[in-house]
Amino acid sequence: MTATGTEVLQPDGSSARPMDARAVAARVLARVLGQRRSLSSTLPRYLAPIADARERAFVQDLCFGVLRWLPRLDFMLHLLLECPLRPKDIDIKALLLIGIYQLDQLETPSHAGVSATVEAARLLRKPWAGGLINAILRRYLRESERILRKIQHSPEALYAHPAWLLDALRSAWPKEWQRIVAANNQRAPLSLRVNAEACTAQAYLKELVKAGIAATLAPHAVHGIVLASPVDVHELPGFESGRVSVQDSAAQLAVPLLDLKAGQRVLDACAAPGGKTTQIQEQEPQLASLTALEADTERLKALKETLHRCRRTAEVLHGDAGDPSQWWNQKPFDRILLDSPCTGTGVIRRHPDIKVLRRQEDLMSATKLQCRLLEALWPLLTRNGKLLYVTCSVLPQENDAQIEHFLQHHPDARPLEIRAEWGRGTSLGRQILPGEDGMDGFFYAGLQKT
């Protein structure tokens, strides 16, 4: 697979000469591994110049696959390398990981996998690395059985998760942690939410069948659909006109818990990329007002793009939810949706770079931020108003413990019971674990001001 003539952006923004998928993926992974950039912000820039759809898909598969199995691949590479690579050769390390991933997980024919990865080093303008890559990958082929035996004695490599996260999952879910880990290592399905004002999920499913796209109705999400295999969103009927949006089924379950009614003032805090904002309007078109708040400039652009594509309007504000003095007009809200920043431990299958970008200390930072947001937003809620707290985490420190701490310091708050056929009840909310009914891991808790 070679995107002949494709100009590819390098990390410094300059263009590179034509590359194949492995070389492009190595560039992307070098930014994620070396500069700790998120895959979601890095990958699109490198995919944009590639015209061939199969080539784009292959680049994406290599990037997601390497990050999904990184602890395992890193362990293997450590056994195979006699000397560590220099930091400036992080792209060569990425290429080695890509080569091992192809042989270990994709079962790429050995000759093709080795020769194509060696060639990619030349395209990265590091021909000296070709001999090293050839030697390492051929050594892997010779010693794979020995390496696989060693993996059995390394939990990080065996379960493809960093040690701190394995410890946290074992502690939080002693009976479920292995199932969570297995789900995290699966590829996430492409799930859709049909615009409730445009048509029903059943009607849209028939349109997909006519377009040759296999799909099924999502469990629990009334307007949800799950595709049998991912497709380019622009192939989806009505995507450009906002008739359908990409949104996991678990994320779709939040808005119905808000108990929306006509005439209410609603705040969607931390609103980007806008899926829940548009869903709020679809569920209750007769709101008095809808305010969508976002602190991050780049994510604010995504929020506006979503609203524009879906033909929706809202009061879009750029501001910190933890500092309402910047943006609040002193008019209280009847409903507040706080889709809080978190460690993302419930969506690792969808964002495998979490295994690289998150560290143990990030858990404490996340809980402090969540506490600050809850404290800041609570005064904005009208009497008898409801706040829905949502995370895509499975760690109790960010979920039940966070709500328990809040209730201890706010006698004017009472927890709302969430009764549902999905997920599992917790002491103060409801939790979906990754992979349950095909959904991402999410936590929900409702609070009412008394």
Image (tube, rainbow, N blue to C red):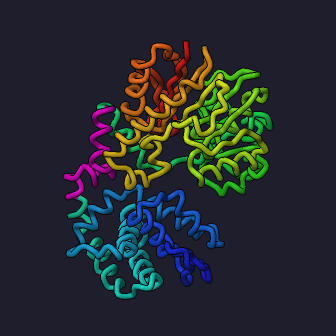
**Residue 103 seen in the current view:** no
Please determine whether, in this image, residue 183 is positioned above or below residue 142: above
Please determine whether, in this image, residue 394 is positioned above or below residue 22: above
Residue 336 x, y percent position in the rendering: 60, 28
Question: Quick one: 97 or 42, which is closer to the camera?
Answer: 42
Q: Give the residue at x 38% y 24%.
A: 405
Queried whether the magenta region covers residue 158, the answer comes back as yes
Residue 213 x, y percent position in the rendering: 69, 51
Instruction: State which quarter of the image contains the C terminus.
Output: top right
Residue 135 x, y percent position in the rendering: 29, 80
Quadrant housing residue 92: bottom left
For the stretch drawn in magenta, the main secondary structure is: helix
Q: Give the residue at x 72% y 29%.
A: 283
Question: Quick one: 133 or 372, which is closer to the camera?
Answer: 372
**Residue 187 seen in the current view:** yes
Residue 115 x, y percent position in the rendering: 41, 81
Please determine whether, in this image, residue 40 is positioned above or below residue 375: below
Quadrant housing residue 401: top left
Question: Quick one: 39 or 332, which is closer to the camera?
Answer: 332
Stretch in magenta: 149-173
Direction bottom: furthest residue: 127
Please determine whether, in this image, residue 176 is positioned above or below residue 147: above
**Residue 282 falls left or right of residue 427:** right
Queried whether the magenta region covers residue 118, the answer comes back as no
Q: Give the residue at x 27% y 48%.
A: 163
